[in-house]
Image: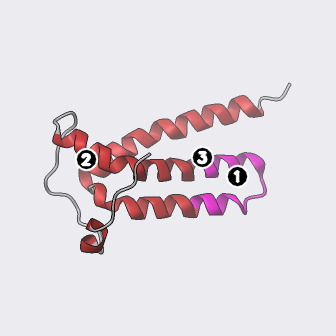
Amino acid sequence: MNPFGILIGLVTFTIIGLGFPLVIRGERYLGYLWWPYMMGIGFLIIIASLFISTDWLSVVTGVLGATFVWGSTELKEQAVRAELGWFPFNANKIKPPFEEVIKKWKAPHL
């Protein structure tokens, strides 16, 4: 009997579940304009997972990176939900570096 699949499934479920508060809190305190930084962190984590020789740690690291990439695509949608009143809105958000450049880019979505 090999519990590897079940354990990885539970860990993946937990990491993805923690991604939801990451998006909600990230948008509330930082704003959706931080999406390129969040996406970059996610891709760096995914690339790091390629160099980890332990199977379970590589899988968990890859799932963590993918969760960050997914979260970066959800920040704009979360901003819309906050403006609709579904979530608390914070007008005093921390501005990202290169804010004017990022505003010209279209925010990704899935």
Q: Disc number at residue 39?
A: none
**Residue at 62 percent of width and 52 percent of height:** 61
How packed mark 2 is, by other alpha carbons closer than 10 Å (few <14, some 14-19, many 20 or more), is: many
Q: CA distance from mark 3 to mark 1?
A: 9 Å
Secondary structure at badge 3 equals helix
- Give the labeled residue for mark 3: 63
Up the image or down, 47 lies above or below 58; here it is below
Q: CA distance from mark 2 to mark 3?
A: 24 Å
**Residue situated in front as seen by the camera: 29 or 105:** 105
Secondary structure at badge 1 equals helix
Q: Quadrant of residue 14?
A: top right
Up the image or down, 58 lies above or below 2; here it is below
- Which span is picked out in magenta? 45-63
**Residue at 55 percent of width and 61 percent of height:** 43
Secondary structure at badge 2 equals helix
**Residue at 36 percent of width and 46 percent of height:** 23
Q: Quadrant of residue 4?
A: top right
- Give the labeled residue for mark 2: 79
- Give the labeled residue for mark 1: 58
Locate residue 68, reporting x and y percent.
48, 52
Q: Amino acid at mark 2?
A: Ala
